[in-house]
Image (spheres, helix red, strand yellow):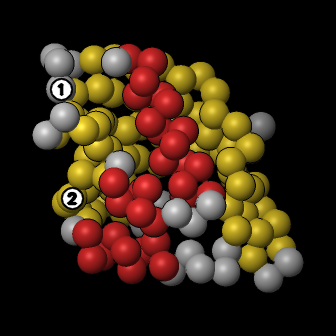
Amino acid sequence: MKSAILELEKQYWQAMESRDFETVQRLTHFPCMVAGKDGVMQVDEESFKKMFDSGEGKQMKVLGISNAQDQMIGDNTGLLVYVIQLEYTKDGTTTASQCACTSTWIQENGEWRCAVHTESEMKAK
């Protein structure tokens, strides 16, 4: 399962990039926990959908995922850490960012879902 966690994470980001809420929803454990530049929160499915929809009109592109490391904790929990490079375009303006991310994946009813995700924006080098 270890290498499959990274593949699930990539599917998640591809779905975010293509604005495929059904895939994002299927890969998310609700309520999920999120930590990032807006603070920490526990998010139910309805709130998650509102957050997802608030990105309408803002195009995100995944430029790359690197330095990925994963670890299994028992049979039903996987941890993943990595660096992601993103590009955002809104109203003709493009910005890039690089974040250190963590995700905790749990197996629930035979399906793997992300229960916790964090993003820490990294300093430009």
Q: Look at the picture and state if 101 lies above or below 35.
A: above
Taking the spot 46% from the left edge, 72% from the top edge, the residue there is 52
Is 28 rendered above or below residue 38?
A: above
Circle 2 residues within 10 Å: few <14, some 14–19, many ≥20 = some
**Of callouts 1 and 2, which one flags the residue occurring earlier in the amino acid sequence?**
2
Question: Which amino acid type corresponds to the residue marked 1 in the rendered image?
Answer: Asn
Instruction: Between residue 30 and residue 40, name the one nearer to us.
Output: 30
Image spot of residue 64 (x, y percent): 70, 37
Q: Is residue 122 visible in the rendered structure shown here?
A: no
Q: Nearer the viewer, residue 40 or 63?
A: 63
Q: Secondary structure at mark 2?
A: strand
- Determine crowd level at label 1: few under 14, some 14-19, many 20+ residues with C-alpha closer than 10 A: some
What amino acid is at disc 2?
A: Phe
Mark number, residue 76: 1
Q: Quadrant of residue 93?
A: bottom right
Label 1's element? Answer: loop
- Relative horizontal placement of residue 119, taking residue 59 as reference (left or right): left
Q: CA distance from mark 1 to mark 2?
A: 16 Å
Give whichever of 38, 115 is nearer the camera.
115
Specify the quadrant that holds the N terminus.
Answer: top left
**Residue corresponding to mark 2:** 30
